[in-house]
Image (spheres, grey):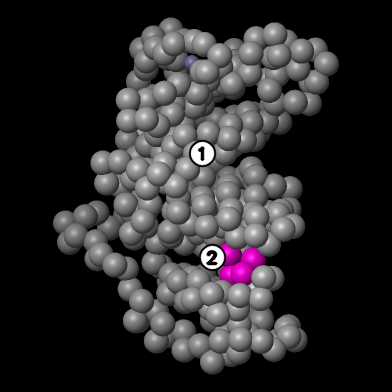
Amino acid sequence: MEHPLNSGVRLVSPPARLMYRIFGRANPRGWADYHSAPERRGTLWVHCHGPARRGGANLEFIGVPTALRAAALQLMFALVAEMRAGRRFRADEDFAAPLSSKRQSFMQIGTLRATAWSDRDHAGMLRVVDYREPLQSGFPLRLFASHIAARATLAEDPARKEALCRKSLAVFAGDFTDLADAIGVDGSDADLTELQNRCNLLGYTGLAEALCAQNRHSEACGIIVDAIARCPGWARGYREQLLASGAPENLYTRFWHDADIAEIATRRQPDTAPAPTRSAAPRPAGNGGFGSRAPDPYDELLKRG
Ligand SMILES: [Zn+2]
């Protein structure tokens, strides 16, 4: 698909890219040409040119809400960096890497799909989609939600952290799952990568943490109920850890002490049950909010700016 090439589309101008290539070789801006082209629905097609000439792959995200343009660029830089570090990206292969922060405790996972662009500039491009999703699934909301949640862990200001976690949950509210089999009673076997990808766990725990840091313990309890409902297997392990950690007693820790996890999981079920004809494969989207794959799931986010 062709697109106009102007300063609004080019995320790094050619002279600036040349500067980075010569004087800032560690800067990902010099490693590829990054384009952000408007799509018909008001979303963005963010992609890069260049890596394919050096044995890598040109990558794209489609359906990027304009509010997430910066996040798309950060993720694109991280993926191009992976290729520079020697990782081979091929169609129909999955990737797992810590893309958003050196301190993140989980891997981001996703899958690459071959696109069908026929024009010379974009032929052969690989689309980044959510883990094991098809080409047509479009915007990888789990990946972006994970990115924003991982960046939130770096925020020192609780209000900033709160805003980022809320943004992450607006992108993907998380599926309801029970990975109880994968999680030991002490939480030690919890696969955070999987919990994050399925439930956006870090979005919830980060938000609860940020609220507690602002002495808003009651709000934190309200938020963590949503996390417990989505992954009760995690909650059972986490409670053991929290109560053994000697955390100061407050409304939030008392809530964890008294919480009836099984009851919460039974009471707070998905708003809408999946239609019986749907495939049993993991659904791409969560329940409610941005999780749905309605014709244009980004309207609300765009409204929020
Ligand atoms: Zn392009």
Q: Residues within 10 Å of mark 1 (few under 14, many from 20)?
A: some
Q: Residues within 10 Å of mark 2 (few under 14, many from 20)?
A: many
- Disc 1 on helix, strand or loop? helix
Identify the amino acid type marked 2. Answer: Tyr
Residue position marked by numbered label 2 in the rendering: 204
In the figure, 204 relative to 264: above or below?
Answer: above
Apparent side of residue 18 relative to residue 123 in the rendered image (left or right): right
Span of residues in magenta = 207-211
N-term mark: 2 or 1? 1
Residue position marked by numbered label 1 in the rendering: 68
Determine if the magenta segment contains residue 174.
no
Which residue is depicted at the point 57% across and 39% down?
71
**Foreground of the two, 64 or 158:** 158
Dominant SS in magenta: helix
**Foreground of the two, 87 or 187:** 187
Which residue is depicted at the point 61% across and 75% down?
216
Apparent side of residue 86 relative to residue 114 in the rendered image (left or right): right
Q: Is residue 164 visible?
A: yes
Residue 29 lies, in percent from the top left, at 68, 23
